[in-house]
Image: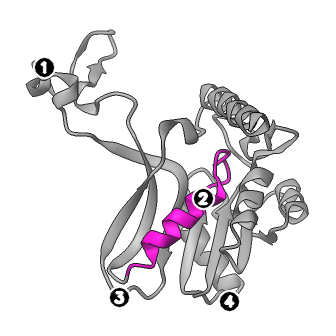
Amino acid sequence: MKHVAIIPARGGSKRVPRKNLAPIGGKPILAHVIQAALRSNVFEQIVVSSDDDEILTVSQQAGALPYKRPAALADDLTHVGPVVEDTIAALKIQADSICLLFATALLLHARHLHQALELLQDRQVASVLSITEFDSPIQRAYEMNDSGEIQMALPEYFNWRSQDLPKRYRDAGMFSWWKTSPTGQQRRGLLIPKTESVDIDTPEDLLLAEALFAFHASRREST
């Protein structure tokens, strides 16, 4: 089977400016993602779609194929779906599967991709999404109004013990991988440990990702 990875990486991030190029461990985050994908030896092609010349240069230096997307697909409102579709059409990509890799998946490891591919090889499986468990039971969440008053969002769970609540999961912000012509309809989740996944949306997320990256790097050096 032919597998192609597409990494959308626009230059206009607002909450964490230039987060795709944030330097961690001596190289931009995006370069770490590309190189983890290369080390997996899974993909016939790794493409970075961006509107930003610096991002495209970094992508090429790291070993990916840079593709400059139209400016109309680089604003704050454009969903990732049209970006992937544009990349496939513009480069005439033909593949058995497409893996959408996120440009800030700093903790992505080749083994994550191998595990996902193993799931995807099941004929009943159409797609695999990286997921991770919520840090605490989401059923115990609170709401807060404009005056600062709080109340439980789901008060029916007030008397439940945390350990009795069913587990809930969220997108781990690493990848979504799907077959282009599936024979089955199952959507599987690859569970990523919380210590191996940070979805970088805020400056605090970036600090946490950097700390976890350093932690894993120190463990590799000590073995």
Magenta stretch, residue numbers = 101-122
Near mark 4 (Cα within 10 A), the count class, few <14, some 14-19 or many ≥20, is few
Q: Secondary structure at mark 1?
A: loop
Mark in front: 4 vs 1: 1
Q: State which quarter of the image contains the C terminus.
A: top right
Lower sequence index among marks 2 and 4 = 4
Dot 4 or dot 1, earlier in sequence:
4
Of the residues shown, which amino acid type is indicated by label 3? Thr
The residue tagged 4 is 92
The residues bearing labels 3 and 1 have C-alpha atoms spaced at a distance of 43 Å
- The amino acid type, in three-letter code, at marker 1 is Phe
Which quadrant of the view contains residue 43? bottom right
Q: What residue lies at 87% left-to-right and 65% top-to-bottom?
A: 60
Identify which residue is drawn at 66% across, 86% down.
Answer: 93
Q: CB of mark 1 within 8 Å of CB of mark 2? A: no
Residue for badge 2 = 111
Amino acid type assigned to the residue bearing label 2 in the image: Arg
- The kind of residue tagged 4 is Lys
Reading the image, the residue beneath label 1 is 158
